[in-house]
Image (cartoon, rainbow, N blue to C red):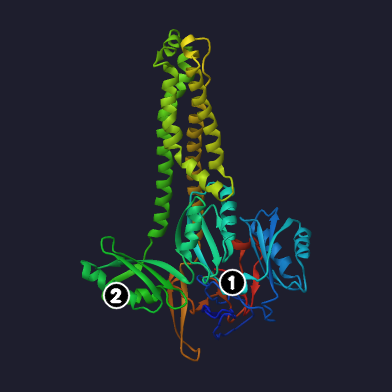
Amino acid sequence: KKQGMARVPRRKTHPTLERDEVGETNGDEDGPEQEMQPLVSSRRNNTQSAMPENGKEATTKTAVISVQGMTCSSCTSNVEKVLRRMPGVHAASVSLLGEVAEVVFEPEQVDESELVQTVEDAGFDAELKSVRRKASLYAGTTTAKFRVEGMTCSSCVSNLERVLNGVRGVEKATVALTTEEAEVEYDPDTLDEHDILQVIEDAGFEGKLLKGGSASMVCLKIEGMTCSSCSSAVENALQKVPGVQSVSVNLLSGSAEIFFESDKTGPRSLLQAVDDVGFEASLSEDEDDANAFRREKESEHWWNLFLLSASFTVPLMFVSMIMPSIPGMRNLLKEQFDGFPIQEIFKWTLATPVQFVIGWRFYVGAYKALKNKSANMDVLVALGTSASYFYSVISILHHHFAGHHASGKFEATDFFETSAMLITFILLGKYLECRAKGQTSEAITKLMQLAPTTATLLMTDEDGRVLSEELIEAKLVQQGDLLKVLPGAKVPTDGDVIYGKSLVDESMITGESIPVQKIPGDHVIG
């Protein structure tokens, strides 16, 4: 059996990105060869890529190809595999949800039409969307992750991706509807995270920064703080840690939120800093609970809006559809008040708050969508309900000023109940959709919990010799760490193999049931 080790790569800061640093390893073997899982290097917060060996950065291009017909992660793996085999292709990345392939290639050896033809030969429908002169994988870009709220369908995702990709300085933007997250690769010399947040909000959605550039965020649970002096001591200790950008300590909740540069420090260093000033700290487990609480509050919000809308719509439908069929009620509804039939006044009064108070969010969303030259569900709802409402208003006013109400010869035709019912049922649909998305996110969270909870950390000297090993939580793995994976164990995090070879089960990622052989230099997924 072979044991392997790997060092977590450190992020380069030079504009021209180089290959990740790797450490040396050692191991022993005995008996017949039975390969074990190799050690891996974590890339959780790494935002760089390897430079092509020939160094022809200036001649590379990035082609974005729309790929239709993919149904699972095995399909994406097949597309990536056939593209990477082509001469002149440096890298290929395929998104199943976005149905997009991004290919970095040298135009001297292969052109865009050959890439499209290769994808079609693999059994999928392909269409070239765009070509960029410079490959973003080799540029001095950084990546930020955002929480995006307000997306309801794939059209919202497409519109947001289009808007983000159209911003100067943005190299690539990927949006996931299920997780409500957007990952944006951009040039930090051209714009920053706050500019991207403004773009998201201008597109009609609510955004929140989760991770910006090389900075990561971690929440710590701190015990033992009793006064403002304690919180100040913790804050000062954390700010002295190299790589920490900002610290926010909450005395009442006993927590701390830290933004730090992941290539300079990590959770272990932060926990040690808090421990050195006499307090007990641990990684907060409240993130999943906070997400579940947020989804529950969102569902409750839509349910309350539905009930409020129904409280106006049900009486409106009763007056419009049922009361005229009750003997004696028809004449009562035709009685006039200030020249208007009572029925019309009653329906107008009930439909107005549904249209302009409860349904105001549809007008706001429609305005932002049209401002970005796109049409979404809000545009459809606002257009359809406004047509019904304003036609009804115009009809009532026309018959009133024409004297038709007084003469009784003509009756106004209105559709107030139509606009109110549309908004009410759409709100019900929003609630059901939010519940379904919450259940999907919960399933994804449970799937992520299948990942290893611990990792074996190796302590080395300056010469790379292993001095000791320690079992730590997988959440505490930092860039630059050297990890050991035992036979049969799961890979705790993404990284590069340093020593050893083995067959690794990647079925959870690729859908391929046959284990894949990994040798030194290969990348593994945790």
Which residue occupies the foreground of this view, 210 or 205? Answer: 205
**In this view, 264 is above or below 148:** below
Is residue 449 visible to us here? no
Q: Secondary structure at mark 2?
A: helix
Where in the figure is residue 473, as x and y percent of width and height?
43, 70
Residue type at mark 1?
Val
Quarter of the image where the C terminus is located? bottom right
The residue lying at 43 percent from left, 30 percent from top is: 352
Residue hosting label 2: 236
Quarter of the image where the N terminus is located? bottom right
The residue lying at 65 percent from left, 71 percent from top is: 134
Q: Earlier in the sequence, mark 1 or mark 2?
A: 2
Which residue occupies the foreground of this view, 170 or 286? Answer: 170
**In this view, 239 is above or below 116:** below
Which residue occupies the foreground of this view, 452 or 127? Answer: 127
Residue hosting label 1: 524
- Check whether the beta carbons of the residues at disc 1 and disc 2 lie within 8 A of each other: no
Where in the figure is residue 418, as x and y percent of width and height?
52, 27
Separation (CA) of disc 1 from disc 2: 38 Å
- Left or right: 438, with 130 as reference point: left
Quarter of the rendering containing residue 35 = bottom right
- Left or right: 68, with 444 as reference point: right
Tally of numbered discs: 2
Residue most toward the bottom?
463
Where in the figure is residue 98, as x and y percent of width and height?
62, 56
Residue type at mark 2?
Asn
- Left or right: 340, with 33 as reference point: left
The residue lying at 55 percent from left, 74 percent from top is: 495
Q: Residues within 10 Å of mark 1 (few under 14, many from 20)?
A: many
**In this view, 4 is above or below 293:** below
Which residue occupies the foreground of this view, 246 or 498? Answer: 246
Quarter of the rendering containing residue 240 = bottom left
